[in-house]
Image: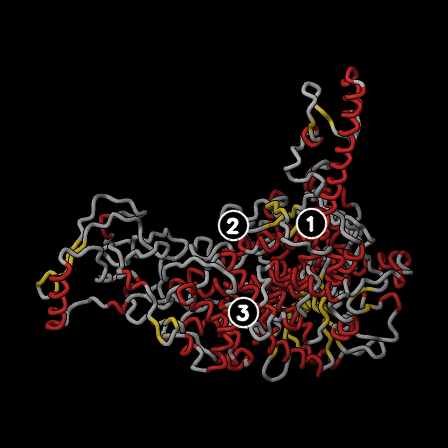
Amino acid sequence: MPSGTMGLQSLQQLIESQYAGACVSVDLLRIASSVASPYQGRVALSLVVDAECCLDRLYGGYVSDWICGGQWNRMLQFLASLVQTLHAHNLHLAVFFNGSLEPPRMHEWVRNQLAARSNIYQVLRHLHTKGTPPPKVWWVPPSTLRTALRLALRHLKIAVLSSVDDHHQEVIGFCRDNHFHGILAEDAEYAIFDPPRYFSSKQLKLTYKGSLETKEFILDEVAKGLNLNPNRFCVLAALLGNFLLTDADLREFHKRICEENQTPLNQPEGVIRAVASFVRELPSIDNLESVGAKVFNSTTDGRVNRFKQAVNYFLNGTLRQHNHHNEGKNHKHGNAAHETKARKLASEAADEEQNEIPDAVPSSSDQPQEEVVENGGYVNGGSQPHGSSSGSSSGATSPHRDREAWGGPKSGEGQYQPSLPPVAAEVLRTAYERHRRGLMSPYMYQLLTQGEIRLPVVLEDQCHREVPNIQLFYRPVRQMVYAILFNLHHHTFLAEKQREQQTDKSETSKDLFVVAFLLCPNHKFSLLDGVTNGSSTPSNSASTGSYVPPQSLNGSGTATQPNPLIPEIKIREWVWTAANPYRHPEIVVAAAVGWPVPTVHRLWFGTSMDDKKRRLRAFLSCLHADTALMLNPDYVPQHLLILACVLRYIMAASQGTILQKQELDALIVQAFAMEITNPNYLQDLQLTKVSARGVQLATLVMEGVETALLVNDACGSPVPWPVCCPWLFFDGKLFHTKLSRTQTVRDLHELCEHRGDLIMKVEKLRKAILDGLVLTPLPPRPPALAPMHDPAWAPRDFLAGPFNVNLPGGLKRGGQRRGVARGGQLEVAGVVVSSWVPNYGGPRGRGHMGSASGRGGGMMPAQNMAAPQRNGHVHYSTRGGRAARGGRRGGHQATQRKQNNATSTNTTTANASQSNGKASVNSNESCDSNRYRASM
């Protein structure tokens, strides 16, 4: 259910809480066994599921470890159990995902994203303070959840569909057109549409006793409770507040009617009853103009027109308007069955894809011909892209409703229309069909038709110093995707060739001019004028007679500047940042891949062996993974190619500044672990602590997987979809377990439990990931089991402790020096064993090489910076690692920069340590969890 506060959405809460007879508990399996089929050969019960309303239920209900990055095998197990139960009871589902941008609902989408961002803030704060999974109220969909669900449902042969233009209208239209028995959702708009039956997706539960329980909303009881004719529900919905006519537009109206009915304005129930009373007392609703004038006390108010649009929008979803619309639609599209079908991708066999994806509607010989759905898409009654060659002005619309049918603003109306190169009609048809059937990333069709993309918020700390903004981190990859989709290299090649032709013509014209000048020098200015007036001939300076390129005369620069004939590819990206929380989109320009990439038509439909190689090379190039080892199955197994490419990009794009050695090893080990395919083991696995660092790294990796799958779709799917499924290579809980173990084990042998085969696999994959990379060595970071540092929302200062007490060296918060530090001495048994000079260096912290962490502020001895070696492996041990944690209760005592008398002092130190045993110097306490570069 949308998380907004609009009055229409409060109607859903009112139905569930106030009207007992309108919300009853049911068992869908019993209903399936009792429903009589109206058509021969049809299943007993068919329901349309709005996946956007039940992402948490499809994920497997509430799993306390969702914060770890996603338990994808656990999700697959739950869905498999659900599908098995459905098949056993002859119940059919068609799952709808929202694949449309829906510009009129932009403010609604932003509000939901900001609400999710607020939950993320609470989640990270909870992790920093307690280190345990957060409560359910702060649930946020894990990264890549929608993509993982689409792949899982496809794997289980459940029909998946994706909306194109308007999500709600297409869901209700699909339900009616294909004679489905009801809708499984949680949105008040469906209650206004009056579906055949309306079930709650929020209350859906698959119990251990074999029942599928939920609640059914009886809309006749809702009408009785409101004492309102159902025919007037559309006017009620328009006056409660919606995406076309917002709460702010109706605030004065709500205040006026609440005063008349003496109901409180701040209670949604009172507002709903007051509006229902107003609608009930209207003499007629046929003249919407007069109703709008009565609501807003004006006939010229612009809100009157939006009120009529809102009423028509909801009216279009009702059965009466639907039947009226179908009469004209069937006549108009009577020959739609003979339209050209979308072409299959060359990388996928036609019979394979045909057999893998089931029909969205069960077959029935008695169904009307115009209602048949073939392979998840309409044969009749659906509008196809009309072969528009312009990617920015495509005529593609909803497969269930014409845009004009509901009377609302069209997609993109009043919006910025990007200027993009044309897209081949065959590419657009194929993208449309695959998008509608949920076979590719929804971003693809949005980019090709509207040049816009909306990226949701993710589990990340914007103030974190080591993990950058994740969506911005993968922007260079998306820029190359834009270049591939709109054929940047092809247009560049044509533009350069055209400029060369113009240059050759210019050189020829110059030679003719010189000959004419030599033959008739007295007429040089007339000849010059004649040449300058030409459209494709060069121009010469009248004062000097020297050659001037045409670009200079046209004001577009010289020949060394970018070719103006190359079309600009600019995409609007909606990305949340602290400076721009979805206030305006960012204009992103496509970036060349770096080699002659074929056109998208060739990538998608080319069948030669060279085409296959180019598809795979284009995919690898976008992720900086175009190396020989990445294609060697002995180093990179096929089911780990996606993960390897993502890790390769993270290491290459950040130059190794994000992932540490033990973190990279933890990601690789969990991918090879046998436990990753055992959901029962993963469910019983207990985590001692959930670190905020691990959560953000898991999010970084899974967002990389989402981006890699987008690249795969853009390049023609060179990586088969069965090996793209995230449950093959990642589990959030298992990753956190391995990451926690890296803080206690000494080397890779212990992390792999001394399994030689696993060690060899990990080392090979690590070598393939780092092949050819030149990484800058960085200092070690504190172990994950150390006391947590300041929360991301608190002021960060590496010079102060978590509570900013006893600041050393005369430093204030913010690193400002009050005076010169005095240095210090170390005494053991009353004997001065060492001393150090004042520290004149900068602030300490992870970002400064060799900076000490103790209170003395001196430099750490150089010999302690190297990681201890054992059998040629870097050790992970951090036992007694107070040196790395910064010595919050006394500091590390081995931080001296200078010793006054090296020989005498060292002798005294050794004797004192043996006699008293009180010396706190221990070089083995230094943190040796070096970055990955130190181990190479």
Near-viewer residue (542 or 634): 542
Q: Which mark is residue 70?
A: 3
Query: Position of 774 compared to 277: left or right?
Result: left
User: SS class of the residue under badge 2?
Assistant: loop
Amino acid at circle 1: Leu
Mark-to-mark CA distance, 2 and 3: 24 Å
User: SS class of the residue under badge 3?
Assistant: loop
Amino acid at circle 2: Thr
Quadrant holding the C terminus: bottom left
Query: Position of 295 compared to 896: left or right?
Result: right
User: Residue 315 occupies which quadrant of the picture?
Assistant: bottom right
Determine whether 870 is above or below 407 in the image: below
User: Residue 913 occupies which quadrant of the picture?
Assistant: bottom left
Pointer 2 or 3: first along the chain: 3
Query: Position of 810 compared to 56: left or right?
Result: left
Residue at the image position 64 percent from the left and 49 percent from the top: 590
Q: Position of residue 93 (x, y in %)?
A: 72, 73
Q: Which mark is residue 488?
A: 1
Pointer 3 or 1: first along the chain: 3
The residue at which mark 2 appears reads as 577
| Mark 2 neighbour class, 10 Å CA radius: few under 14, some 14 to 19, many 20 or more | some
Quadrant holding the N terminus: bottom right
Q: Position of residue 160 (x, y in %)?
A: 71, 68
Amino acid at circle 3: Gly
Determine whether 550 is above or below 919 in the image: above
Q: Tell me if residue 280 can be seen.
A: no
Near-viewer residue (98 or 651): 651
Residue farthest along the front direction in this orientation = 518
Q: In the image, which is nearer the foreground, mark 3 or mark 1? A: 1
